[in-house]
Image (cartoon, coloured by chain):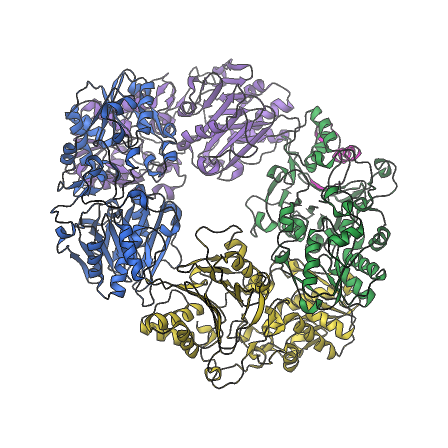
Chain colours: A purple, B blue, C yellow, D green
Amino acid sequence: MCGVIGLFHAGEEDVFPDAVNGLFQMQHRGQDACGIALADGRIVRHHKGIGHVREVFPSRPLPDFSGFVATGHVRYPTQGDNRVRNTQPHVVSTLRGTNLALSSNGDLTNYHTVRARLEEKGVDFLGTNDAELILKFIAWEHLEGGCSLLEAIRRMQREVRGAYSATLVTGDALYAIRDPWALRPLCFGTSGVLHVVASETPALDIARVDLVDEVGAGEVVHFGREGITRHPHPDVASVRHGSPVPAHCIFEHVYFSRPDSIAFGERVYDVRRRIGAWLARHEDEAIDVVVPVPDSSNAIALGYAHESGVPFEFGLIRNHYVGRTFIHPDQARRDDGVKQKFNPLRSVFKGRRVALVDDSIVRGTTLRKLTRMVRAAGAAEVHLRIGSPVTRHSCFYGVDTPDAEALIGSRMDEAGICAHLTADSLRYISVEGLREAAAGDGHFCMACFTGEYPEPVREQKASK
Amino acid sequence: MCGVIGLFHAGEEDVFPDAVNGLFQMQHRGQDACGIALADGRIVRHHKGIGHVREVFPSRPLPDFSGFVATGHVRYPTQGDNRVRNTQPHVVSTLRGTNLALSSNGDLTNYHTVRARLEEKGVDFLGTNDAELILKFIAWEHLEGGCSLLEAIRRMQREVRGAYSATLVTGDALYAIRDPWALRPLCFGTSGVLHVVASETPALDIARVDLVDEVGAGEVVHFGREGITRHPHPDVASVRHGSPVPAHCIFEHVYFSRPDSIAFGERVYDVRRRIGAWLARHEDEAIDVVVPVPDSSNAIALGYAHESGVPFEFGLIRNHYVGRTFIHPDQARRDDGVKQKFNPLRSVFKGRRVALVDDSIVRGTTLRKLTRMVRAAGAAEVHLRIGSPVTRHSCFYGVDTPDAEALIGSRMDEAGICAHLTADSLRYISVEGLREAAAGDGHFCMACFTGEYPEPVREQKASK
Amino acid sequence: MCGVIGLFHAGEEDVFPDAVNGLFQMQHRGQDACGIALADGRIVRHHKGIGHVREVFPSRPLPDFSGFVATGHVRYPTQGDNRVRNTQPHVVSTLRGTNLALSSNGDLTNYHTVRARLEEKGVDFLGTNDAELILKFIAWEHLEGGCSLLEAIRRMQREVRGAYSATLVTGDALYAIRDPWALRPLCFGTSGVLHVVASETPALDIARVDLVDEVGAGEVVHFGREGITRHPHPDVASVRHGSPVPAHCIFEHVYFSRPDSIAFGERVYDVRRRIGAWLARHEDEAIDVVVPVPDSSNAIALGYAHESGVPFEFGLIRNHYVGRTFIHPDQARRDDGVKQKFNPLRSVFKGRRVALVDDSIVRGTTLRKLTRMVRAAGAAEVHLRIGSPVTRHSCFYGVDTPDAEALIGSRMDEAGICAHLTADSLRYISVEGLREAAAGDGHFCMACFTGEYPEPVREQKASK
Amino acid sequence: MCGVIGLFHAGEEDVFPDAVNGLFQMQHRGQDACGIALADGRIVRHHKGIGHVREVFPSRPLPDFSGFVATGHVRYPTQGDNRVRNTQPHVVSTLRGTNLALSSNGDLTNYHTVRARLEEKGVDFLGTNDAELILKFIAWEHLEGGCSLLEAIRRMQREVRGAYSATLVTGDALYAIRDPWALRPLCFGTSGVLHVVASETPALDIARVDLVDEVGAGEVVHFGREGITRHPHPDVASVRHGSPVPAHCIFEHVYFSRPDSIAFGERVYDVRRRIGAWLARHEDEAIDVVVPVPDSSNAIALGYAHESGVPFEFGLIRNHYVGRTFIHPDQARRDDGVKQKFNPLRSVFKGRRVALVDDSIVRGTTLRKLTRMVRAAGAAEVHLRIGSPVTRHSCFYGVDTPDAEALIGSRMDEAGICAHLTADSLRYISVEGLREAAAGDGHFCMACFTGEYPEPVREQKASK
């Protein structure tokens, strides 16, 4: 996960409030830490910390912290640990007044190889974070190699493998950079004077900026005093080992993105409704009521209801004073508080055959508890309907799935999972069904379901 | 608002965790401050502070703070200011080992009269809070007057007017006390060994305690080593000036209570669905889609959809990292953040005739912004459908409505309000429609709509 | 240790700043916790906390916290633990507007006996602190027994044994109370309108108040709207089991009190100079230079120098950014930082026969390190000169001496101690020498040296 | 003021605890902020903050913060403001693994000129601090100019004017650097494996390191894996515009340094005693008692006493729970608390002709209050004896003297000052007397007394 933002104000007004507001709209992508770097035309300053956006950035302006160019980040810790030195944006300072700051979303797959090569040249690393590697690769090529920043980015794109949606700030310009597979989302928009790059479109909405486009696969977009300049990758297929097509992370549609986001060209809410409709069309049980596991499955369940005519009900009431369960990185805290978070409505469940809709099954811990909770609330039958195929493989691109052995889908077949979850039936959307629902250009990374990664993954996940 | 809890463990196990969890389930009733008093069979200790439950009570046990009897409170400041000395539970200590602690939800209407009478007798007050008055009245009669606690409570009920749902802790017993009108909710349940009294049933659910009943109008329920003893009021009509019926606050169903609560004998979710159904049955416009202002109107909009067949959609996406708007007591913070909180889904609204459903209109500020937001998102028509009648009168019993002049419903007629909110049409449920939907015993306080208060209110709201 | 203060302003001006300043002047008596209770003519409010005066009481006024009567306390924890519930002042609240707050310095010797008697009557205790016992005894007699406060205090003085120098606040008056032995210091003064009671006179000085007198042994002084009324004990000898004389703690002169304090009628600085003079007169070694262990022994060493003509030098430089070593209650922290705290001046010690002067030897740990440090700094001989006799017995009246077995003076003879401390010679002042130096009325408790306690101590120190 | 430290452990053990302890021993040189940078053989990490050493560096180790090379700083803010970005050590990071961190004590006199020159070359500055300028000058010459660090330092010494005693850390080495005038102190020592550089020798003492020598005027000392290498300046007179002699700040002896420090080759305590002896030899009044303003004048007064035979007394008792008055940078806080800090001993002053000894008179505010305080305590006559000549001129090298017009010595003659301070007589040591007392090489900067600055000061103090 994680979320990135980039801002450039052509009138050179302070973008700090917009940066904070934009990060706040992407708080669901990472609650662990956040940071912002601002450039005032010359100097890049940064402020970052552990905690929510509201905690790290109070509502009042910070002393000595303003600028018209910004990069910002909210962190969900998939990589490295929770130390401040792995907090983004990362910064490179030199004596020459060339300061660079970069935030990135996504995991690299050849971090160790590239880092070793850079270390041989004399580059030092403060932490173990992918974004630091990307930044220092670019900085090295630009500052030591003497090439332009754009060319430095191109060199990085040739060497570094994996997912990165990044924003890079110099003293007076902003670059948006996306990996050749376009794995993680990155879009940009403008109000005419204020340009905003972000992982999700609500960060544009809050700034009253109109969406222009996604940053293309391998594309670099430059925002400077001369305006917006798009630099499509000159030969993106070659840096994809010949693949003609990108590979967008399907999990953005399934779970990560807000429903009001437009991801990979499609409104997430609409995609989720189509997922629900697919599940409804493939229903083979008699269902009295369809109930989502709120909030990520609300639109899926609603799509099911609209397609099937089965009544939709809010059968599980969620206490929003707790955070999103999935957001906590360790198992212990993930289990914690299912009861505190969800309370079942007996009048909805009593005597009914329930389709309980969830977006995905990772470990199955929460869904097992919810199935029992729903049955204890009087449901006659509990049929689990899942808005994604069986999750069987680890992700190497930034989704915090556990190692394969912790995935219930890699250890059991569907019947086994159904029994383990104590459900009456269990149905997943098919890979093709999900692809249809996701629409867009149709080019998705579905490796977590299929094991077919966009490119060979040589380094072990655990090795970092 | 505010929420109260009371706990008694017959096995004399520590109820601190259950008290914290229960208050957490009622956090929506008050985010301003909270507190718990615990009795260990002899001594009553308390801990309270400004902030959310999670802030005041960390997840680890507190040193020297345990007990098998508890009273707890979450505060929404309608009364007095935000000083700690007005934080509940209030405590009375004496030398004799008789310690009393009390939490109450609801506003009194003759506070000044009763306080003056007590002060004449020599009773001192630390703050200006209703609960302190109730506690000290009872304590005076019991400790100085020499009567039993039950008799002291009865005397209090004869003198003190207004709303109070209270829990009172002695060294080794718990009392649940409710005003003769049963204005604010108060229920109790038991697991056999653990007895819980609470403003809302989810506080019972989290403790795995079965609901037994509401505390009756004017009733006192005693929980002690000898078990549960109910003391219905011997002559409740007389302390209601002859009124044979109670007057439950209808706003609990409309807005305050969680949908999974059972209030005044009815599941709130079901009541809200019936409100929506009533609105659908009285629809006089052609509607393409029904959209709630989340989350308080979700069930109303769903009831509308089920009754009418008009599709329900989540057209406004809510950022849950902000709190509930209404919860902040001052106008400035109430306005703040409508854009941060709600983002419209263009694909839902585009070209459609929208029924936008909200639970009530107080000042109209938020709804005016939302109406414009929905129209800007492409809606062809915006029809506002409100789950309560026109709010025209102040509440004197604990609902934080502003003075009448700030209520848009007291300043304009419906056409004027509709124009002010820039809507195409505006419909409210009728008083009778709401009464039917609320069901239960049918005896509600609807003074905020009708101006008919259960009893004459002599003191001015502003005078405290 | 511990320090108490009491204030009364006849013009009914706020005494909060003077209370804070006064406690700050007695910070050396206790750095563990502090608190103040204020009465405004009617209500007593209190504020207390763990930490230094500057931490618990910020320099700005506290909201809702002012009054013209005050009692205050700085705590050095000899009794009970470091929990807030043992923090002073203690408070008794009742419904009748009779609020009492009390701070006390000194330890009781029959705490358990008296507590048990009170508990039988129904009095409850929140903690295990002597001052709570004193307060509740008085409160019980006054509130339940119906006698006057003065008479209640007299009854307390008849039953409670041990040391107490206390200030008691009612809604509109202040009482100063001292045990019949006058073990711990307590004096009072007035500016005409502002009356101040304190453990040490610098608390009067900072308030620009002139010292009037000590509170006499067993005396009660009342400060009210009618002025200052002294109530000498009507029969103090009887509550001293016939002893005609008091027993002032000699350690106030030796170590506790500031040199600028007037304790038991004598300026502490002058007493210490006389102690040093005695040591000089009894010198039997050839000494080149006299050096104090700063700061508590400065005046002793100076007195030695003036008497003997041996040059005084500041041979050990103290880093004042650390606190006073003795002030930390546990052995671990007491050892900690001798090197951080003291640095020897080689040019002072080099080749010289040094008289190293300290006020007392308790465990000997620090002095052993200092002796080695001085020798390592070049001293030819190190002769230890101690401003008090051999400390052999525990104190039961509030001095935080360890159990007798931890006292080096109870385990070894003087030759053994001298060898253990690696000194060339070791001399103590004699009991009689100290008594002469202390002057005043000559009636001191010297039990820590002689084992002769003013009255039999029946309860074990460890038993609390 | 300010204090610097540098550490290098040849056994590559962590020097963090020694760095903290050493800074703590120099806390009196700056209480405003502090920081440490550590190198582990490759990477330089830093940690700094606003506050005392104990606050910024807790007693437990910090995660990810260790190393065998260190530079550290305590700040007294003479330069720039109190923002974190002006906190030391300053750091330069580059991609090449060349990280530099530097701490410096002393003010530059051509900051703006040098900064402008560097900015023209493209060097950027984060703040306005002298140490950042020194570091970036060196870094630029080394990193961009390609010369060795030693040569880069030599270039800096040719261009930069003013006072600097600095420690510079690379990934695996430590440099000690001193300006050609040797204005501020800087010494070094070694235990064989642990080498320590510091502003004052107690920072060596606490690390059990033996003093080797001062860092010479213009000298650079290198501490690396190959040992200690001294690089005396090849032509120090030329960078001093031909001056054959250095100019040590005499105020270190008068006030700044701890008495146990060896500064400019002399023990400060001994210098101060000699100052006092000079004052005694030049006494022209009949004096009964000599009393220091503690603690900075203790040794001066003692020297006076030993020379004259007049008895020394601690007549003003200092409350050490307040910090050193002079340390607070603004006038308001400097005045604050004379009464809280000093309490006079009436028995010392009563009827006596007092020599009140202070180290210097800057504004005269405190001394005027003390003179009155001493007279009010009964002194028959108050004769002020000052351990330095009349302070008439501003310092441009790091002593926080106010602008000349705020110096009482620049506005009045001695008679006028004496009258203003309400003293009976006032005597200063002469410039020559002070020089004799200070001994050492005899080459001191006494510009604050004489106006003769070591080199012309072209920039205005107020201009920064």
Q: Residue at x 56, y 50 (%)?
A: D58
Horizontal side of B334 relative to D375 (left or right) equals: left
Horizontal side of A432 relative to D290 (left or right) equals: left
Q: Residue at x 27, y 41 (%)?
A: B399
Horizontal side of B431 relative to C337 (left or right) equals: left
Position of the N terminus of chain B, as image quadrant, is: top left
The mark total stands at: 0
Residue B115 in percent (x, y) is at: 29, 54
- Is residue D147 a member of the stretch shown in magenta? yes
* Closest to the observer, D283 or D145: D283
Horizontal side of B392 relative to C56 (left or right) equals: left
Residue C314 position (above or below residue B53) = below
* Closest to the observer, A30 or A422: A30
Residue A113 position (above or below residue D279) = above
Residue D142 in percent (x, y) is at: 72, 31
Residue A301 in percent (x, y) is at: 25, 28
Residue B359 in percent (x, y) is at: 25, 32
Any part of residue A385 in sight: no
Which region shows up in magenta?
D142-169
Residue C150 lies in quadrant: bottom left
